[in-house]
Image (cartoon, grey):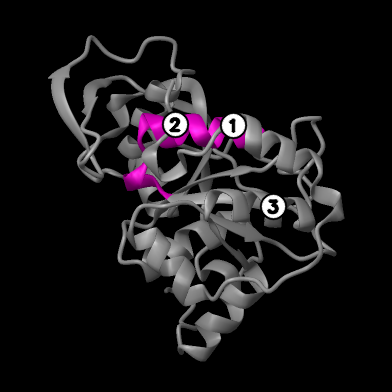
Amino acid sequence: MVLDRYYSRSLKKNSAALDGANGVGTSEFDKIEDAVAEYEKGNFVIAVDNEDRENEGDLLIAAEDMTPEKMAFMIRYTSGVICVSTAGDRLDELDLPLMVERNTESLKTAYTITVDYKHGTYHLWISYCPFYIPLLPSPGTTTGISAADRSSTVRALADPSVQADDFSRPGHVFPLRYNPGGVLARVGHTEAGVDLAKLAGKKPCAALSEIVLDDGRMARRDDLRVLAKQWGLKMITIKDLIEYRVRMGLTDPKW
């Protein structure tokens, strides 16, 4: 499949660059304002958490802006475990309870039961337009694991008109319960993705997945800088996002 036009450089060139990432020196992270601007355009952002936490980076994007091409890119450069963070009220509407009653995961990531959207849509990519045009309703999701199927599921989770019965359970996309207060309440990628969506004027729903290297290791900060440079992605820290919200007065626990 041809990658999204936003990320049209060769995979071979980028894979070679990632393999040599350990020799790259440090550089400044991007401004939160610049990351928000990319979110507004429907582009990916890399968010890095604290070195004393996971010390990992996630690809983040507003869920409503997901396309099959962007999903293929996300799968290619991450673990392939695609999560969607959204508000608890929305998950309650969709009848998506927590995956387990007693969460013993180290960071208490609030996974719900997994889902697939039942009703897929055929799309046509117009090379000179930055969006997909739906053409014909399809018979529905096939296996649920393809980039097209998972893209449909991600968008459906962000669509307030989609109801609980529109999803199959279990599925291949992992919804996450966003912590009210966002990164001020929990310093995680789950909250960072939704906070960026809110700042960008998008629906409070974000797709995210951890970035990994071709040899299976988790991408660390120097590795992430290489990926960001090669694909022209903005790269921020959750720490900076916290400071930005405080500076902008966005400290209401219900924000």
Q: Position of residue 226 (x, y in %)?
A: 69, 52
Give the labeled residue for mark 3.
226
> In the displayed structure, would residue 143 be above or below residue 85?
above
Packing grade of label 1 (10 A; few <14, some 14-19, many >=20) is: few
Marks 1 and 2, how far apart in space?
9 Å
Looking at the image, do the residues carrying marks 3 and 1 touch, with CB atoms under 8 Å apart? no
| Element type where label 2 sits in the image | loop
> In the displayed structure, would residue 37 be above or below residue 11?
below
Q: Which residue is drawn at 48% across and 67% down?
A: 35
| Element type where label 1 sits in the image | helix
Give the labeled residue for mark 2.
3
Marks 3 and 1, how far apart in space?
13 Å
Q: Position of residue 19 (x, y in %)?
A: 79, 38
Q: Is residue 253 left or right of residue 81?
A: left
Q: Which residue is drawn at 39% across and 67% down?
A: 37
Q: Which residue is drawn at 75% across and 50% down?
A: 223
Is residue 55 among the parts visible in the rendering? no
Q: Where is residue 185 in the image (x, y as percent from the top left)?
A: 60, 71
Q: What residue type is labelled 3?
A: Val
Q: Residue 11 carries which label?
A: 1
Looking at the image, do the residues carrying marks 1 and 2 touch, with CB atoms under 8 Å apart? yes
Q: Where is residue 183 in the image (x, y as percent from the top left)?
A: 58, 69
The answer to which of marks 2 and 3 sits earlier in the sequence is: 2
Which contiguous range is marked in magenta?
Answer: 62-81
